């Protein structure tokens, strides 16, 4: 039976006190020591103003505040006497829990509603279920609960802003599906199952999809979404056909395996070719399990949404999770990507595996890293050697990775190209890291991802992939070529030549050795990619280094000016005003100053602002021949005016 504090009307609450009689009556929701028995008119005001006024409404019922001995309070110790008193509380109509505060009670009821738990054990007529919204993305329908975009308030989290992230992961899986068939892929954190459903619906027999989640409500919704998309569900080693499931005699057609267990457990028990990790927050707790049983030349992708720590807003959390010391810089997004890759590399090295970074994207809401696994101690050692510390100048934002070796240098400031330590007082540089110092992109893999995005009509991912290809090749978009990556019979990626769809079996080669048409699972022990082909590390923001009082050129024109000066240059997806180049910062500022025009303001009578040459080109200011710098400055003003 329901508690007496849960009533539909105030009259029902008054019936409990039997206010019709003229005798003194006690309050049914208060103990005798708190509220003494009184006459009906006073008891009516008490019930209305204290209990009914602050009640919480749900499905036509009112959960009034209760002062009875239902919820004990911690005893107060005063000398040798222990006084035990009872606190005010509410009784939940759904789960009969006792909640102290009214705001907490409202939030408690809302969580029940978001989880779909609206049927009360006390109500004889079942309450109507909360309406579920059907969201469609990439020809895949999924049912979502209310507040589906707030992970704290729902079990089936679905973020529409992560559509680009899902498309990039799908393209990476599609490229892997062209290399070997079929592949076993795992979505370790399924939520609504949208990602695994897209894999199975578009790639079909090329993949064997497993969707996992540790929450029972999420697993139930994943099964319902599978039936909504006419997919067979394999749960607990038993196939379960939906009402509209397609079963034309093919055993493994459109079959999705749904599991309910911890992500670390399923990755320890089974082996996969493709694993995607997308937890709420950091993914470092699942890296060891992911690399333990992943197959050779498989792919591990992970999405980190703890951008507050990765983007140096919560530096103590970055030190706690990633063991990395960082500060806020102009290239903080690329710094975040290198932090995650360094954590991935260390986790893979503990399992005697190396990594080849295929893709690293850092946008507003997430950091996506996709790596290929190379089994063996030699690739693991080669990958671990690429984890180095970074020296960052806090005055001019110049940066450089520390030299390899274990010997302590007498003056680490000499490694920086700038001269800020000699001209500025105090300590000017900090050591950041450990970070990944290798390449962030694989050009061949990105071109194949772009080809797959065009094949499946993923329009949101194509512009970003074009930018990534140009960034990997360190070239501008006007030099971008749109040839198919499958046209060449030999395409080297991670030391493996991949067979084109129209090529014969004899064209599939691994370092000159002929193989069959089947999947090439073995990789050479030693792989030394050409360092000259790697893109320059980090980028410069053109606004950060603009000259005060000068109008800087347009970004695309500035890229041409740097290219004409003999430097490699490209734009970057990390920053819309960023320039990735191998030019030193001093030369970067020199070219920027050369093609900037003075700015004249209406109220400025002194003319344009002049800066010393030492600030522009990293050189010292030259004095006048007679030692009078002031005379030389006046000459410059006269000549310019």
Image (tube, grey):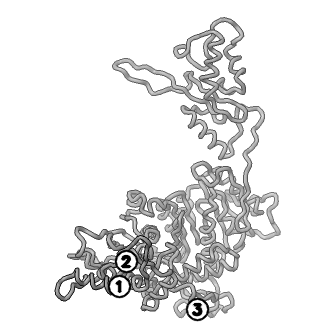
Question: Where is residue 617 drawn, in percent x and y?
Answer: 32, 83
Q: Which residue is mark 2?
A: 607
Residue 115 image position (x, y, % from top left):
65, 46
User: What residue is rendered at 60% in x and 75% in y?
Assistant: 172
**Residue 596 location (% of width, % of height):** 43, 82
Label 1 Cα crowd, 10 Å radius (few <14 / some 14-19 / many 20+): few
Residue under the point 41% across and 60% down? 318
Q: Is residue 215 above or below residue 429?
A: above
Image side of residue 183 versus residue 574, left or right: right
> 58 or 187, which is in the foreground?
58
Earlier residue among tags 2 and 1: 2
Displayed quadrant of residue 163 = bottom right
Q: Residue at x 56, y 12 (%)?
A: 36
> Which one is earlier in the sequence, the residue at label 3 or at label 2?
3
Indicate left or right for 79 with 145 as reference.
left
Whole-number angstrom distance, CA of label 2 to CA of label 1: 9 Å
Q: Nearer the viewer, mark 3 or mark 1?
A: 1
Please tell me whether residue 464 is drawn above or below residue 639 in the rendered image. above
> Could you tell me if residue 158 is visible in this image?
yes
Q: Which residue is mark 3?
A: 490
Q: Nearer the viewer, residue 467 or 452?
A: 467
The CA span between labels 3 and 2 is 61 Å
């Amino acid at each position: 039976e329901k508690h007496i504090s849960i009533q539909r009307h105030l009259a029902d609450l008054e019936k409990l006190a039997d206010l019709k009689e003229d005798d003194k009556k006690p309050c049914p929701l208060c103990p005798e020591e708190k509220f003494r028995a009184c006459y009906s008119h006073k008891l009516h005001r008490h019930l209305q103003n204290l209990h009914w006024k602050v009640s919480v409404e749900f499905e036509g019922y009112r959960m009034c505040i209760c002062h009875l001995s239902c919820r004990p309070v911690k005893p107060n110790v005063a000398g040798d006497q222990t006084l035990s008193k009872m606190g005010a509380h509410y009784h939940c109509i759904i789960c009969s829990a006792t909640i102290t505060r009214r705001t907490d009670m409202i939030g408690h009821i809302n969580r029940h509603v978001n989880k779909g738990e609206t049927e009360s054990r006390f109500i004889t007529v079942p309450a109507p279920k909360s309406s579920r919204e059907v969201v469609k993305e990439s020809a895949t329908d999924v049912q979502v609960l209310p507040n589906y975009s707030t992970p704290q308030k729902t079990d089936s989290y679905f973020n529409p802003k992560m559509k680009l992230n899902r498309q990039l992961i799908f393209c990476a899986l599609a490229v892997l599906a062209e290399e070997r068939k079929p592949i076993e892929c795992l979505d370790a954190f399924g939520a609504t199952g949208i990602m695994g459903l897209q894999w199975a619906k578009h790639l079909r027999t090329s993949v064997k999809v497993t969707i996992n989640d540790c929450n029972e409500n999420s697993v139930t919704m994943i099964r319902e979404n599978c039936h909504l998309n006419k997919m067979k569900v394999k749960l607990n080693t038993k196939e379960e056909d939906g009402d509209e499931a397609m079963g034309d005699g093919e055993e493994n057609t459109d079959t999705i395996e749904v599991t309910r267990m911890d992500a670390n457990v399923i990755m320890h028990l089974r082996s996969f070719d493709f694993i995607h990790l997308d937890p709420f927050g950091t993914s470092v707790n699942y890296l060891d399990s992911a690399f333990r049983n992943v197959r050779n030349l498989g792919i591990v992708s992970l999405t980190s949404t703890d951008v507050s720590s990765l983007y140096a807003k919560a530096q103590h959390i970055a030190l706690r999770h990633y063991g990395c010391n960082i500060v806020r810089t102009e290239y903080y997004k690329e710094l975040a990507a290198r932090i995650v890759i360094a954590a991935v590399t260390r986790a893979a090295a503990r399992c005697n595996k190396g990594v080849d970074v295929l893709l690293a994207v850092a946008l507003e809401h997430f950091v996506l890293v996709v790596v290929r696994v190379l089994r063996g101690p030699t690739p693991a050692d080669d990958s671990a050697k690429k984890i180095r510390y970074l020296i960052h100048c806090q005055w001019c934002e110049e940066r450089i990775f520390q030299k390899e070796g274990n010997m302590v240098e007498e003056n680490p400031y000499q490694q920086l190209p700038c001269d800020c330590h000699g001209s500025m007082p105090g300590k000017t540089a900090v050591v950041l890291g450990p970070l990944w110092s290798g390449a962030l992109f694989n050009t061949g893999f990105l071109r194949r991802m772009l080809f797959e995005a065009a094949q499946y009509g993923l329009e949101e991912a194509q512009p970003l992939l074009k930018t990534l290809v140009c960034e990997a090749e360190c070239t501008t978009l006007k030099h971008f070529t749109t040839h198919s990556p499958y046209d060449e019979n030999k395409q080297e990626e991670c030391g493996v030549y991949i067979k084109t769809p129209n090529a014969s079996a004899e064209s599939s080669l691994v370092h000159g050795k002929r193989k069959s048409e089947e999947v090439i699972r073995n990789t050479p022990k030693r792989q030394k990619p050409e360092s000259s082909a790697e893109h320059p590390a980090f980028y410069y923001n053109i606004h950060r280094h603009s000259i005060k009082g000068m109008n800087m050129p347009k970004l695309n024109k500035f890229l041409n000016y740097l290219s004409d000066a003999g430097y490699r240059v490209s734009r970057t997806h990390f920053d819309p005003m960023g320039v990735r180049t191998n030019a030193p910062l001093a030369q970067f500022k020199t070219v920027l100053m050369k093609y900037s025009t003075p700015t004249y303001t209406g109220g400025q009578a002194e003319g344009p602002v002049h800066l010393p040459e030492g600030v522009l080109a990293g050189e010292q200011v030259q004095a006048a021949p007679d030692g009078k710098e002031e005379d030389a400055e006046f000459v410059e003003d006269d000549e310019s005016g």
